[in-house]
Amino acid sequence: MAETMIEISNCNNIAEAKISITENTLNIKYGCNGTGKSTISEAIRLKSEGNSLEGLRPFTDEENNDINPVVNDIPFTKVKVFNEDYIKKYLFKSEGIFADSYSVLLQSKECEELAKKISDLLNELQSSFNEDDSISDLSNMLSEYMSVVNYASGSIAKRGGLGEFLKGNGAGFEKHQELDAYKPFYESDIASVSKWADWRTSGINHMNGDSCPFCTSNMDMPVIQKQNETIKKVFKKSAIKTATQVLEYLKKGIEKGYISKDAEKGLLEYLGDEDKADELYAELSQLAAETEYLQKKLRAISIFRPMNVTHDQLTEIEKSLKSMQIDRNILQKYYTTDLMGNSVDAINAKIEELLSKSGQLKGLFFQHESKLKKLIDDRKDDINAFFTLAGFPYKFEIKEEGERKANTYLIPFGKEKAVSEPDSHLSWGERNAFALVMFIFDAISENADLIVLDDPIAAFDNNKKFAVIRRMFDNQQEVTFRDKTVLMLTHDLQPVIDYIHGSFFKAYGLTTPVRADFISNENGVIKEQAIEDTDLLNTVVLTEHFAKDEDKPLFVRIVNYRKYYELTTSGFKESACYDILSNLIHGRSIPEDGQKQPMPQNLIDQGMLEIGKYMPGYTYEKMIEELKSSNLIKEVSENSNMYYRILAIRLLFEREKNLLQQLKKEYPGACKFLNETNHIENDYVFQLNPEKYFAIPEVYVNEIRDFIDKHGVIA
C-alpha cells in the first residue's frame, strides 16, 4: 500500500518530525504524554485546510523569532480530526446532539437523487417566483402594507395612527381652506410636516398679545386661532406617519406596475374628509384583502417542497397545488394591471402543468419518503446496537424536521422524554464514546481522505473501547472507517496490544490493515519505531528474562525481579524475598522487615536463597556494594539507554539525602513517573521491551535534570 511521509518542523515542542502514514490502513502512533501527538494532529489539519501554522510557532525569545512552523506538502485535502475541540464545536448543541444532524446522518446518494428529480419537476413553478423579478419584488413589498394597517381576521386596525388617518387627519390638507397659506410647507415634504407643525405650535405658545413671536407683526387672531385648531388636528405625528406609509406604498406599487392608477384615485378622494371615514376604511380594507390574498399565495408557492409537507398532504398533492392557484377575480380593484395579470397567468399555467404530472410527482415523493424512513430506521438501529454493546442506558432517536433538517435526541431507558442538555447529563465516558460514533458519520459524510483520532479511547473502560473500535471499522455497516486512511495518536498501549498482538481485527472479521509505531520526542526530534507482533511481550516473561540476564546491570535485574515476584507470587508482601528486594532498592546496608526492625539472619538467608535462583553468586552485602550511589551515578552519567538511566536515578534518589521525597515536593509529576518504573500497577499483561521502546516526557527529563543540578546529586 502507498505510504505518505509527513514532515513537520518548528511546531510547538517538535523541532523535526517525519510521520509515515500508510493509505487505507489504521496507523497507530503510540507515545507518552508530552511527545507532541496533538501538535502533529493540528499541524496536519491546518496544512490540509491551507490555514496559517502561526499558532504552532514554538515559544522562543523574541530575538529568535525567525523560526517558522513548516509542514511539507501533503496529499490530503479533507482531514477530519476527533479531539476535545471537535466535541465542543459540533456536538451537544442545546437539546440536540449534533449541530447538523441531517447532513451527518441522513444524507445519502439515493435520497439526494430522488430529491433532485423532485426539485427538477418543481423548478418551473419555483422559477416563476424566484426568476421573475417582478413577482419576487412584489412578494417582498406586500408585507410593508400589511404591517401599516395591522390587517388581521379580515379587518384593519382602527386604533393609533390608522385611527387618526381614518378621521381625515394626516393627509388631504388641501381640503382645509384655512391651510392654503401653508401649502409650501406640506406639499414640499409631507414626511416632515409634523416637525414644522410642532415648531409652529411652540412659537404660538410664546405669543405676547397680538404680536407674532417670529416677526413681531400684528396678527389676525380669529384667523390664527382657526389655523391653530386645524393644524393641531390634521398634522398629528401618528396620522402623518400612517398616511405617508400608505401613500408611499401606493406610489411604489403604481411605479412598478403592480397597482392600478385608477384605483388610487378613488382612495385619494376620501383623504382629509372626516365624513368619508367609512369609505376610506372600505378602500384600505379592500387593498389589505387583496394584498393578504396575494401574499399567502406567493408564500405558499415559495416554500412548497416535498420535505416541508406531511404524508397526508402528499397523498392530496393535487389539492395542495390547486390551493396555490391565484384567482384573478379576487384581485378586483388594486392589483389589476397588465403586469399583474400576465404574472398571475404564468404562475397558474405552471401549476396546471404540475397538476398534469401529479402522479409522477407523488410517486417521487413517496419513494423519497420511504428511502428516508428506512435510512432513519437503519441509523437508529445501528447507533442503538452500539449503545447496547457499550452499556449505555439510553435510546437514540432521530426526527426529520422539514427539508434537509433533522434533530437527534437521547431518551433514558424507561422514560419517554428526551434528555435536555445531554452534555451536562452524560458521564465523561458516555459523552466521548458517543461523540466518537457521531464522528464516524460526520467524517464519512464529508468524504474525509484522512481521519485523525487524537487519543480517542485512552480513558474508556474496556467495554466502551471494544464497542467504539468495533463500530469504527465494522465490515457490516455502510458508514464505517473500513479501509479508510486513519491516524490514531494515543498514549494508551492497549490498542497496540489488541490490534497488533491480539489480532482483535481478525478475531471480529474486521478487514482494515493495522500498523503501529512507537514515537518518542528526544530534544524536539520525533523518532518513529515500527512495532511488530513480536515486540509485544508478556510482562511476566519479560521481567523474568531481565532478572536472569547476567549481561544487564544489577539494578535493572533487581527492579524487574521484584516486578516478576509481585506478578507471580501470592501474598508476596509477607515474604522474606520481597523484603530483601525492597531493602536492596532502598539501599539499606542492614535490611529491615515491614515493621522497620532489623531482619533476622534466617529470613535474610531465606530471601537471598530465593533471589539466588535468578541471580546466583551474590550475598546481600555484595549486592548493596554493587548498588552503591557511586555506581548508580556512573550509570546516570554514562549509560546511553534512557530506561537504564531512569531506573538508576530512581534508586539513587532513595539513597541520597531523602531526595525522592524532595523531588515529590518540587516536581510531583516527574516523581510519579519515576515511581511507576518500579511498580507493576501501570503495567499491562503485555508490554513493549523498555530497552527498545522507552520514553519519558521531555518536561520530566528537564525537571529531573534541573533537580539533579540544583541538589548536586552528580558532582
Image (cartoon, grey):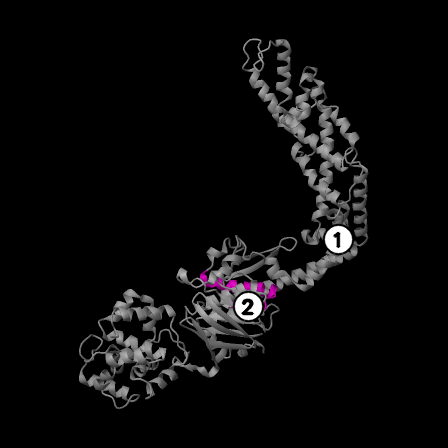
* Amino acid residing under circle 1: Asn
Q: Which label sits on residue 123? A: 1
* Amino acid residing under circle 2: Ile
* Image quadrant assignment for residue 696: bottom left
**Nearest the camera: 420 or 653?**
653
Q: Earlier in the sequence, mark 2 or mark 1?
A: 1
At horizontal 39% and vertical 84% (from top left) the residue drawn is 541
Residue 436 is situated, as x and y percent measured from the top left of the image, at 52, 65
Extent of the magenta region: 427-452
The kind of secondary structure element at disc 1 is: helix
Magenta-span inclusion, residue 651 = no
At horizontal 51% and vertical 71% (from top left) the residue drawn is 7
Magenta-span inclusion, residue 429 = yes
- The residues bearing labels 2 and 1 have C-alpha atoms spaced at a distance of 38 Å
Q: In the rendered image, which residue does mark 2 sit on?
A: 451
User: Tag 1: Cα neighbours inside 10 Å, few (<14), some, or many (≥20)?
Assistant: some
